[in-house]
Amino acid sequence: MKIPALLSAELRRLTATRMSVIALIALMLVPVLYGGLYLWANQDPYGKFADVPVALVDLDEGVPASGDQDAADYGARVADQLLDGQAFDWRLLGADAAAQALRNGEVDFTVTLPADFSEALTSAAGEHPHQASLVLATNDANNYLASSIGTQAVEKIRRSVAELVAEEAAGRLLDGVADIRAQLVTATDGATRLAAGAADAASGATRLAEGTASLSEGAGHLADGAADLSDGADTLADGSAQVAGGAARVAAGAQQVADGTATLAGYADRAGDAVAHAAALLPDARADIARVLADHGLSDDEVAAVLAELDPVGEALASGGDRVAAAVGQVDRLAAGAATVSEGADQVAAGAARASDGAKTLSAGAGRLASGSADLAAGATRVDDGADSLRAGLTTLRDGAAELREGLSDGVAAIPDSSAALRAAQAETIADPVAVDTSTTAHASDYGAGLAPFFAALAAWIGIYALFLIVKPVSRRAVTALRSPIRVTIAGWLTPALLGAVGMVVLFGVLSIALGFGFAHPLGTLGILILASFTYAAIILALNVWLGSVGQFVGLVLMVLQLVTAGGTFPWQTLPAPLAALHHVLPMGYVVDAMRQLMYGGAIDRVAGDVGVLLLWMGAALAVAAIGVTRMTHRRTLRDLQPSLIG
């Protein structure tokens, strides 16, 4: 009997009755139901988080405005952000209502913003900085994974709040730096003017020092002159006293002269009056003489001769009168001058007395001047020394102002100029300086696609395992009749392998069409599923040939082992060492790896290695099964011809 005939006979047995057909179809659909339903249920659980009920409790009291600090209510801002984000089905509740809802299972976890939430976030600027708290309350009796999700959610909230606060703090810092830069620019301008002023001041201080040196020298000369003046003033006081005494005596003598000249002037005036009177009488006397002479009979010539003799006397009298008048005028002027001299002498005497008093005052003042000049000279010396110190200090100030100007200029250059938009971008970068730029060599579209290789590989094993519940691995009648172990083995293997391959084709259709998973290499992926079905069929066949019903149980144990060692969910490196060693031995891990490479577009060269391992398992399992069939052909009894209770 040929292998096709053996296959045909087995298929006829499996489809002999309606119930047999139903059972066969049901078992063939086991991998489809297992893989399809599980992956459908878990296709995109992260996209359904918006339906997860979560209680949000906002107890934050905020921070009132005070001083330079603005009012802050981070609790309300975070609550609004969470409610608007709709990452979960957030429900804003009170503390008691949230606790009751968590106990009753109405929410999966609660997030509480404490009363001091804003105060703690702003405490970094105060004297008692401390961290703010986010209070997460979970109830594992509702769902353990919900608790894990809550932990991740709170961490994300914490990170976003930290970024928000850091961004605002960085914004204030950058604004402060910008203000500092503006003030530094102003300070630089002021320092420039200060440096120029300091240079001018230093130059002026040099001139001042030169002037104070001259002042000190002149003050010395002044002190010497004031001393000489004091000596001269003393001498002047003595001389003024003598002058005052002499002036008093002169005034007394001048008064006597004035009195004498006044008497003389009186006499002179009377003499002048007499001469003037005589001169006035002379013409009448001449006429009287001429008349008398004429009466006496003198002729006119004789009268003229007599009168001619008398005319010189008259002329002399007139001339003497003129001289007397002149002398009287001089005597009068002398008297007036003597009186004036007397008055002047009195004034001179009074002035000399005042001069004497002034000289005494001058002497005293000259003494004080000499003393003050000496003090001035000493002070001028100190001023000169101070001017030298001032010059040195202003020179240092000039150099320091220049250094300050250069330092401020360097400080301005060290602080970059920025706009408000640039500072906002800088604050955002400081708050979150690292962005994750994700690149992937192979990409799974969603959570379900990420699990598909594992559950498809597991479904293939379950499908083969279920088929062997009704498929007769090796026909004892064929073994007894044919005595061809290889043909019997191949025929016993191909029946479940082909039926399992049909199930894999259906499963692939469900994954690609019904669930919409993408496949970078669809035919390669389908080929791996079929190869997995063939490999698993060979392994289960070998177990059944050698162990019978116990082999079915061992197949179940192998499935459990591969369930945990295939690395279908967590990386296999997280397994304990003994299980990690099994990962490198058992076939399901290689099926999962090959499907990932073909489904996501990974490394094709790795698929060749995986296929090699599966072929090695399949060949080894068929060889072991053939050895078992060979053993059966050499040790057959009539009892072996009886039908098995388990197909």
Image (cartoon, rainbow, N blue to C red):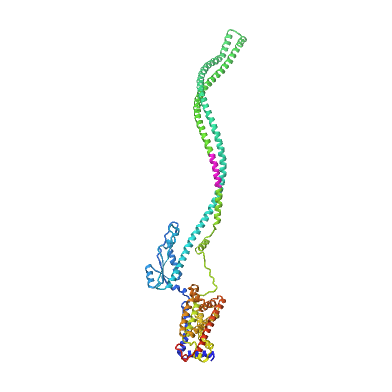
Residue 569 in view (yes/no): no
Whether 303 is drawn above or below 578: the answer is above
Whether 566 is drawn above or below 368: the answer is below
Q: Position of residue 24 (x, y in %)?
A: 47, 87
The answer to which of 473 and 75 lies nearer the viewer is: 473
Whether 529 is drawn above or below 258: the answer is below
Instruction: Using residue 309 as the reference point, say whether residue 231 is left or right of it.
Output: left
Q: Position of residue 105 (x, y in %)?
A: 39, 73
Task: Kindly indicate the quadrant of the structure image that contains residue 98.
Answer: bottom left
Residue 630 in view (yes/no): yes
Q: Residue at coordinates 56% horizontally, 56% vertically from top-left?
A: 413
Q: Is 165 part of what is drawn in magenta? A: no
Q: Residue at coordinates 56% horizontally, 50% vertically from top-left?
A: 403
Q: Position of residue 45 (x, y in %)?
A: 46, 75
The answer to which of 492 and 150 lies nearer the viewer is: 492
Q: Position of residue 116 (x, y in %)?
A: 41, 62
Whether 362 is drawn above or below 165: the answer is above
Task: Tell how many labels.
Answer: 0
Instruction: Tell me which secondary structure the magenta stretch mostly adopts.
Output: helix
The answer to which of 315 and 577 lies nearer the viewer is: 577
| Residue range (magenta) | 383-398
In this view, the residue farthest toward the front is 635
